Image (cartoon, helix red, strand yellow):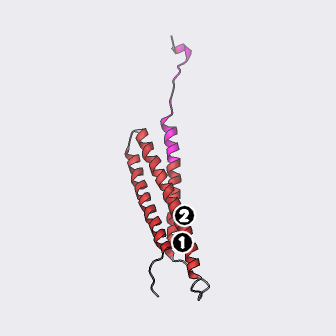
Amino acid sequence: MCEALTGYIKAVAALMIIALIFTAVAFFLNICGLSKSDIRRKYIFYKFATYLAILAVLLELTALIVFPACFYVKMKEYGSRRDWEVDWSYGLAWGATLFTFGASLLLICDKEHEEVYYKEKTIYNPPPELMN
């Protein structure tokens, strides 16, 4: 009972591959941002890495929601079994999605830490008796 891949499986695979590419590019942009000493360039790398990570999470969520919905509709045609289960790779994909989401949250939080750290300014006001 070997069948050709249906359209939804190809679409889900394409979404996951694109999300993998976005995650890899976001990883390398984050490394480039960490290596820069100029704050403005660092924020540009962080911003693009954050956007790509969030976009990857949205693509992964779309794929992970579409796949079981289409799978169960397709399996109703066979009708011989009542229960169909997905493989361990589906759980692994959910784990990857959660880790990518966590990475995007950490990128957002790290940016705020850098803003507070580098915008701090110390002003020294000596006592009046030392002014003379």
At mark 1, the secondary structure is: helix
Span shown in magenta: 109-129
Which numbered marker is on residue 76?
none
Q: Residue at x 44, y 62 (%)?
A: 18
Residue 5 position, x and y percent, is 45, 77
Name the residue type under label 2.
Leu
Q: Nearest the camera: 14 or 114?
A: 14
Residue that carries the numbered disc 1 in the rendered image: 67
At mark 2, the secondary structure is: helix
Residue 4 position, x and y percent, is 44, 80
Q: Please give the count of numbered marks on the rendered protein.
A: 2
Residue that carries the numbered disc 2 in the rendered image: 61
Rendering quarter of residue 42? top left
Report how far apart the C-alphas of labels 1 and 2 lie in the structure. 10 Å
Instruction: Say whether residue 59 is magenta.
Output: no
Q: Residue at x 60, y 87 (%)?
A: 79
Whether residues under marks 1 and 2 lie with C-beta atoms below 8 angstroms apart, the answer is: no
Is disc 1 surrounded by few (<14), some (14 to 19) or many (20+) residues within 10 Å? some
Residue 66 position, x and y percent, is 55, 69
Name the residue type under label 1.
Phe
Q: Residue at x 50, y 75 (%)?
A: 88
Residue 14 position, x and y percent, is 44, 67
Is disc 2 surrounded by few (<14), some (14 to 19) or many (20+) residues within 10 Å? some
Instruction: Say whether residue 120 is magenta.
Output: yes
